[in-house]
Amino acid sequence: MSTNGEPTPEQRKIEPPGIRQVPNDSVLRWLQLGWRDFRLAGWPSLMHGLIVTAVSLIIVDIALIFWPLLPGAVSGFLVVGPILATGLYAISRRLELGQPTSPQDAIDAWRRGTRCLFRFGLLLVFGASTWVLVSMMLFHYFVSAQIDTPLDFLRYVVLQNDHVFLLWTVLAGLVAALTFAVTVVSVPLLVDRDVNTPLALATSIRAVAENPVPMTLWALFILGATGFSVATLMFGFIVLYPLMGHASWHVYRDVVDTERLPPRNTSK
């Protein structure tokens, strides 16, 4: 039982939500709505981009100074990342209801997110750690080149004459696709509705399976926006991260029919 005597999502039977099929050009609409939310929210939204940019720069510094610490830094961000995004979802939800926004809305959402998304973050860390282990074993046993620094890795990518890097790239793509499938709507669903993590993950996978073209286009935009941000020394995240966060809220609202799901209590 929960602290107020009500059964928890794990204790009561909740029917899976319906999935809507959306047009293939929905990505443009999601981006337009995300940009509108970004402009209306102002500073509370921009704050998220500044935080992500600062953390990204710290991770890059760690990689350049002491590469072995990089997996730990990235894994730590995988715990914080989903919780940080809840602030953008909360802002978009308030704008959707015609309510004013403030930095306190994001802070309150982060505080609630530490409870409802901590296990989800640990799941991402487990997946990331498993991928790091697989990558280490692949390069250790099948690559003869000495790779001790990021420059060594780049040199191997440019000069390699074997198929190990191709195999690693394919596996990385599969891992990225699976991660996208389980996260694209599960995080805003966990923030918005009182559901458990397995139901949120299953709903996200169903949303991708029933909307393959628009979801693929959305994934390609995220990939392109992330690549552009990296190319701009992470400063592109200042605008693109909140844009992607707000747009992700509208992805969730368009694709998932939440009418039968109990709302999450946001009064605390």
Image (tube, grey):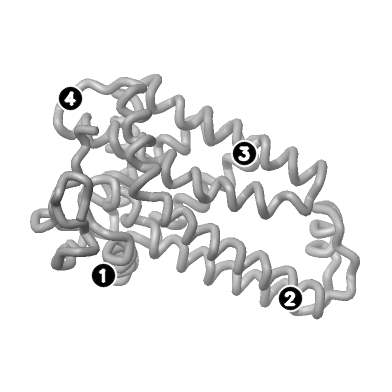
Q: Earlier in the sequence, mark 2 or mark 1?
A: 2
Question: Residue 142: x percent and y percent?
Answer: 80, 79
Q: Earlier in the sequence, mark 4 or mark 1?
A: 4
**Secondary element at tag 3:** helix
Q: Nearer the viewer, mark 4 or mark 1?
A: 4
What type is the residue that disc 4 sits on? Gln
Q: Is residue 29 visible?
A: no
Q: CA distance from mark 4 to mark 1?
A: 32 Å
Q: CA distance from mark 2 to mark 4?
A: 52 Å
Where is residue 92, by image quadrant?
Answer: top left
What type is the residue that disc 2 sits on? Leu
Q: Which mark is residue 99?
A: 4
Give the residue pinned by disc 1: 210
Question: Residue 184: x percent and y percent?
Answer: 37, 56
Give the residue pinned by disc 2: 138
106 to 180, vertically: above or below = above
Q: Nearer the viewer, mark 2 or mark 1?
A: 2
